[in-house]
Image (spheres, coloured by chain):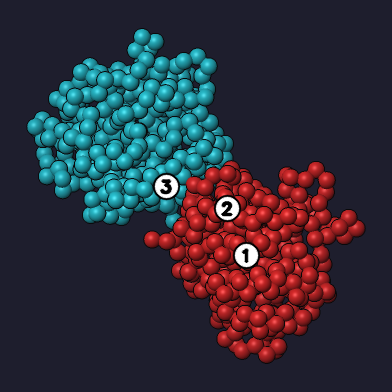
Chain colours: A red, B cyan
Amino acid sequence: MYKDQIIIDGLQYCKWDRDYFLSLQKSGITAVHVTLVYHEMARETLTRFAQWNKYFEQNSDLIMPVMNMEDVHKAKSTGKVGIFFGAQNCSPIDDEIGLIEVMRKQGLLIMQLTYNNQSLLATGCYEQNDSGITRFGKQAIEEMNRVGMIVDMSHSAERSTLEAIDISSRPICISHANPTFAHDALRNKSNEVIKSLASRGGLLGFSLYPFHLPNGSACTLDDFCEMIAKTADLVGVDHLGIGSDLCLNQPQEVLEWMRNGKWSKAMDYGEGNASNSGWPDDLSWFKDELGMENIYNGLLKYGFKEKEANQILGGNWYSFLKDGLEPKS
Amino acid sequence: MYKDQIIIDGLQYCKWDRDYFLSLQKSGITAVHVTLVYHEMARETLTRFAQWNKYFEQNSDLIMPVMNMEDVHKAKSTGKVGIFFGAQNCSPIDDEIGLIEVMRKQGLLIMQLTYNNQSLLATGCYEQNDSGITRFGKQAIEEMNRVGMIVDMSHSAERSTLEAIDISSRPICISHANPTFAHDALRNKSNEVIKSLASRGGLLGFSLYPFHLPNGSACTLDDFCEMIAKTADLVGVDHLGIGSDLCLNQPQEVLEWMRNGKWSKAMDYGEGNASNSGWPDDLSWFKDELGMENIYNGLLKYGFKEKEANQILGGNWYSFLKDGLEPKS
């Protein structure tokens, strides 16, 4: 039964407010990986943490912070939604390796090494040339491994991603992206990457962002389940989860912040273009509190066993996080 | 017996390195309130935390971080020195109330509202006019009370200190200062402040910094014990501790940073003057790992009971911190 399971959404960036927290609670989701920052550097990241502390204080009947898997169980048993944080770029550590531990202690559990562009650590998926993991990047991965901060390569380029998988002594994740075989986009991942990721114990979270899906906003639930099934044929089900990339109720300016940060004078349209510059239309079957349950039921209907659906909807993320967040002793 | 007790030094700012950690371990001190920052603002404070994380990693056989009283017991039982952090100014929160909780989570357990000068929160002891606790200051005290960050008024002016004692719903401390009756200095505290502090459950840590002592560097152990005895006559022994203000092995530039921060173009000499601009000479009986034990034995010799000496050397700080660090539920 869906409602008895631990359900984990491996990435969201919705407009956070009490209405949305109520909707999250109704959705049956146990815990969500929330994007805390896109391009914010260390000082601005503190303000984001402060804003979330206020959300927790003012909505303590609906949400709670998650630092470990005990907190996930506590969220489940109290009917609250657990929130754990990640950064979509390495901007929160500025240029300082010691900030990895500082940010980890503050509650940043996951960090992407890049967001589309070249960073101090690695190359993003929109760069023409991928030079792989940098000198700082190698030390940063080692430090992230030490303190139990999970490496996320969702927005990274191919070579950098393969190198990160190889360099990291602990499994890494691609929290929100799809296989290129389902939809050819710079943000999606090759079979080589997915196989390498899985062979090292990593996790792939399937994205529901229309730009990452076959047929975009017209992608059907059946198309989505077919993509999962084909990926399971490639690497088995143990390494698959959901990272919905759900961005509900966000204004255009947030999309522009995600795409342009402070780096671009010209408007960058990311996965869109000048004539299609807005948020994509929502999927009809993944736009409200029924979304995750729709996927669960879709998987069963498609032929997945209940145990497999449980794994994909949360069990795999749970196991992955449990191992990955433990600091090395 | 000194060595069986929990010994707490309520303030130090020595030159932190392995040699000094070894000396601290030999001193029998269980836990030390370490000044993390003087004038550093939020971003720079993160770098100080990062530096301490490195000290902890590289000297894990000698020191350990303290976030609560269980950690103090752990330090005692493993023969390590527990380190807990405070700021001598409110600079770590910039102008943002939400950073109180952020810094508390990172391990800033104590914060002074001012350091000699007017701050955003209150008036420092060297200002000519003391306007008391500011609008931001009132909210900051309430927030510190909520999250369990202890208010410290060691470097604050009289009216501000009395108001902070009154406004705070939890006991506050003057971690390192002496009574004016023993030595008349702007940094020392009136009987009115000490009585008000104690009547609200607060704690006074006696300073060993020569500028705060009768006869300066020539102050004898007996003079020091006499000052404690007279203060105990005033408010009892339950509210008295040690906050040595020990600054061993620090170069002149650190003294100048403490006194001038980034605010003064002219050289400010603090408690010194142009012809006496350096560190004061160490006290002969409080300059190395025997210092705290010398005080302990001095108190017994002066006539304090063993139980009272235990309280003053650590027991009172322990009880005060145990209550003060617990977040409000």
Q: In percent of the image, x 71 and y 73: which residue is there?
A: A179
Q: Chain of mark 1?
A: A
Q: Is B77 left, or right, of A102 in this rendering?
A: left
Give whichever of B10, A222 is nearer the camera: A222
- Looking at the picture, do discs 2 and 1 lie on one chain? yes
Q: Which residue type carries mark 2?
A: Gly
In three-dimensional space, the C-alpha distance between marks 1 and 3, rounded to whole angstroms, equals 30 Å
Give whichever of B58, B178 is nearer the camera: B58
How far across and how far down the image is residue B56, in percent?
37, 48
Q: Which residue type carries mark 1?
A: Leu
Q: In percent of the image, x 12 and y 41: which residue is there?
A: B306
Q: Quadrant of the C terminus of chain B?
A: bottom left
Badge 1 density bin: few <14, some 14–19, many ≥20, Cα 10 Å: some
Q: Which residue type carries mark 3?
A: Asn
How far across and how far down the image is residue A80, in percent?
55, 68
Q: Chain of mark 2?
A: A
- Whether residue A319 is situated above or below residue A163 in the rendered picture: below
Q: Which residue is situated farthest in the top direction here?
A: B275
Q: Is B255 left, or right, of A234 in this rendering?
A: left
**Disc 2 designates what residue?**
A137
Which of the 4 quarters of the picture holds residue A82?
bottom right
Q: Which mark is residue B53?
A: 3
What secondary structure is marked by label 2? helix
Q: In percent of the image, x 76 and y 76: which residue is there?
A: A182
Any part of residue B244 in sight: yes
Q: Are marks 3 and 2 in contact (CB under 8 Å)?
A: no
**Disc 1 designates what residue?**
A162
How far across and how far down the image is residue B134, in percent?
52, 31
Badge 2 density bin: few <14, some 14–19, many ≥20, Cα 10 Å: many
In three-dimensional space, the C-alpha distance between marks 3 and 2, rounded to whole angstroms, equals 20 Å
How far across and how far down the image is residue A293, in percent?
66, 79
Q: In percent of the image, x 65 and y 50: which residue is there?
A: A119
